[in-house]
Each structure stands twice: as C-alpha cells, then as structure tokens.
Amino acid sequence: MSSIRRQSIISSVVIYIGFAVGLLNTYLFAKEGIFLDSQFGLYNAFIAIATIMMAFANLAMPSFIYKFYPYYKEHAGGKKNDLLTLAIAISVIGFILVTIAGFTFKELIVRKYGTNAPEIVTFYNWIFPLGLGLTVYTILEAYAWQLQKSVFTNYLKEVQWRLFTTVLIILFATGVINSFDLFIKLFSFSYPFIALTLLLYLLFTRKINFTFKLSKVTRRFSKSILRLCAFVYGGSLIFTISQVFDSLLISSVLDDALSKLAVYSVGQSIVAMIQVPQRGIIAASISHLSQAWKDKNMALIQKVYQRSSINQLIFACGLFAIIILSFTEAVYTFQLKGTYLNAYYVVILLGLTKIIDMGTGVNAQIIGTSTYWRFEMLSGVALLLVMLPSNYFLTKEFDITGTALANLISISVYNAIRIIFLWKKFKLFPFTMQSLYTVLLAAACYGICHFAFMNVHGFAGIFLRSIAFIILYATGAIGLKLSPDILPVMQTIKKKLGLRR
C-alpha cells in the first residue's frame, strides 16, 4: 500500500499542477476579448471527438496490456517481449479503419452538425491528427503504468499537453498566431507531441523494445487475448462514449450549440479538479491489482478497494464544497463573461457525479483485471441504456443543466451495478462508517463557512471561505480518523519539511 500511496500522492500533485495550467487556459478562453464562445466550444468539441476516435481505434489494447503484462514479464522478458509491438500495431490499424470510416460518413457529420455547429464541419479533417496522437499515447501510457512510470505519464498528459495549449493561447492573444484557423490546426498536433515525447523517453531509458516475432506467450494465450479484447472493447468503447456523449449531444441538438458547449465545458473543467486523486490512484493501483489477481490475493484487493474509496471520497467531498462555496463569486471576481454564471447548476450536478464515481473506489479496475472482465461489457451496456435516452430528453427539456442531471443519474446507476456485482461475486465492498462520516463532515463544514462569510465578497471572500473550510475539514478528518492513510501522509509531510526526525 505504501507504494500505491506514494505514487498516488506524487501523481496527484503533478495532476493538480496540470489542472492549474488547465484552469489558466479555461480562464483565457472565457475572458472577454480573446476568444469567442463558439471558438472555445470548438476546442472542446475537438477533444471530445478525438476521444471517441481513440476509443474505436485502440481495439481494447490498454486492457490487453493491463491483464497480460505480468505474464509477458515473467515468460517473455527482454527482447522477446512483443506485447507493446502488438498493441501499437493493432491500434494503428484500428485508427486507419477509423479514418476510412470518418471520410466515408463525412456527409452524415455535415448533416448532423452543419446547422448548430458548422465550425466542426469546417475543421473536420484536422481532428484526425489529434485522434491519432491520443490513440498512440493511450497505448504507451498503459505500458508505462505497468512499468510504474505513472508519475511521468501523468506529467505529460496533465501538464505538458496543457502547457502546449497555453503557449498557443498566448501566441494567439499576442497576434503571433494571426488567426483562429491556424490556432486550431496547430492544436491538432498537441496529442501527437506528447505521444512522441513518451515514446522517446521509453526508448532512451531502454524501457521498451520492438520485436516482430510472436512470443510463446502470445501464441499460448492468443485465444484468451482475443476473448478479452472482444468483450472489453465493447465495454471500454461504451464507457468512453458515455464520457463525451454529453458534449457531442449539446453540439448537435441545441441552438447556438458551441457557445452553450463552452459554458458546459467551463463547468466540466472546474469539476475535473475533483477527479485528480482518482487518476493518480488508478494509475498507481493497476499493476498491483493485476498481480494480486494472478496471486489470488483477495485481502490485498479488498484493501485497495476500500482505501481507494475512502481516500477519494475525502478529497472529492472537500474539493466539491470549496468549489461550490465560491463559484459565483469567482465568476465576478475574475471578470469572466456573465454567460458562465449559467454553469453553476452544471457544476453542482457534475460535482455530485464525481463524488459518486470516486467514492465507489477502483471498481472498474478490479473488474477489468479479474477473470470476470466480461462484465465490463455488460455494465457498459447498462450505462448506455440509461445515459443515451436520459441525456437526449433531459438536454432537450432543461438545456445544459439537463445534460448534467442525466450524467448524475447514469453514473449513479452504473456504479451501483458494479458495487452489487463485486459484493455478490467476491464479497468485496468499498464503504465503511467512515464513508458516511466524510459526507456529513463535508456538509457541516460547508454550512458553517457559507453562513459565516456570505457577506464577504471578492478575493477576500474566496480566500477566507476556502481557508476556513480547509482548516475545519482537515481537523475533522484527522480527528475522526477517516482514513488510515492520513497519519502516514502527515508524517511524511512533516519529515519532508524537517519537522520530524
């Protein structure tokens, strides 16, 4: 657990730095006088469509790496290891098929988005380099996680990728990039840039090699690999679609679609801060879960499940409360466009969605690395059966607030199914009484800070509410001993600061 804890903390710090850069980017996009709302919306639509391309193209290769890496490591080490070669080659073939399909059905895209979001049609061809870069990066990232290089991969995806965008924004704002046309074309190479960086790092550190000869592991497990990929591909594809379906739906069914997508995306960007610990914990725990299933170490799996649940819940509830305490004040204080006040209820609903998703721990990773990985597909189907109709009807009825509500309903049902499955099959359960105490503590601290500082505005109000909440919440979390990881983390921090010998 100490290894997972250490990597999770370092990864979380790196990701928070990335989100600080991301918030700066969002601020520059949302500030008066630089970008139009429709241009910010197009930027987010690009990311959503590239993510869909990646999901179709990767052909479940990340899951193949997660599941079979321990076997390749043990039985096909060194230059005989063809795991990464297979994964990249198959994903590139997958992306070629996606590209062919993308141009074959281009007329359908024109009809779907031409009226409400014509900018997507104008720059359609430039989405493909972005999608290819993300596809290759996702494969390399999955392999690097197995090498326990999650900190570096998180730096690339969360910090370096956003810094690339920051540079483009600054060049655009200063007139060096003299048109949005050039800006979006350069942005389409942001994911290829970090994919190339990670590939060069792994090559220069001699962490990978490429071989075009099939290993005995590939030949021996070929049928199992095909079965895994066939089932998991559907599940992972469905889950990815669920992650970006809201953005695609807004772009296609609402009037002034890209401007509304810009407002919705601001809410998404702010709420994404809540999810930071989840990314770090997932990256750090994957290799340990894979090995634990191989060793049939159920005690370790339950420990990771429960610890990941309470640790993420503590972070999620605390950050959500801090965000809601000062969201409206921040819009006025930082002089964002008034339209972004419409993101308030989006932030609340998406924030609750993140709390539920994170509070249920690493259930997806536990199922995905187990012998019941087929359940990925079944639970994904259940997710889409709830999400697609609810998103469509609630978006049509309640605009972007309805979209956020549909996400909350869908993710709640999705995680409930997973919790029940893991309990029925393995007697694994994520919650304890500390889970309830965490929610009650966050609600109490929120109420105290809201009423104590409700008449304090500007930077002073934001600062005082946030600091007061952090002090109250941290004191309560330590006093109630909500997580067994709190004291070790505190001791590590004291040691690093020279406060304890």
Image (cartoon, rainbow, N blue to C red):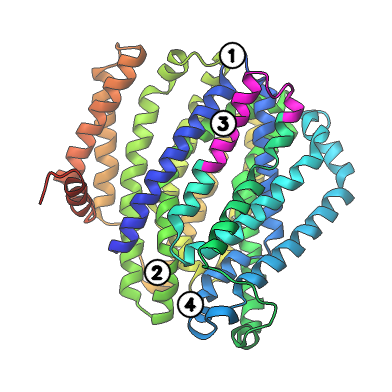
Magenta: main secondary structure equals: helix
Are there few (<14), some (14-19), or many (20+) residues within 10 Å of tag 2?
some
At mark 3, the secondary structure is helix
- In magenta, the rendered stretch is 160-182
Report which residue position mark 3 lands on. Answer: 166
Are there few (<14), some (14-19), or many (20+) residues within 10 Å of tag 4?
some
Image quadrant in which you'd find residue 55: bottom right
Residue in view at x 85 percent, y 55 percent: 100
Residue 207: horizontal and vertical position, in percent?
A: 51, 67
Quote the CA–CA distance across marks 2 and 3: 35 Å
Label located before the other in sequence (2 or 4): 4
Q: Nearer the viewer, residue 139 or 282?
A: 139
Cβ–Cβ under 8 Å for marks 1 and 3: no
Residue 70: mark: 4
At mark 4, the secondary structure is helix
Image quadrant holding the N terminus, namely bottom left
Residue 459: horizontal and vertical position, in percent?
A: 35, 15
Cβ–Cβ under 8 Å for marks 3 and 4: no
Q: Nearer the viewer, mark 1 or mark 3?
A: 3
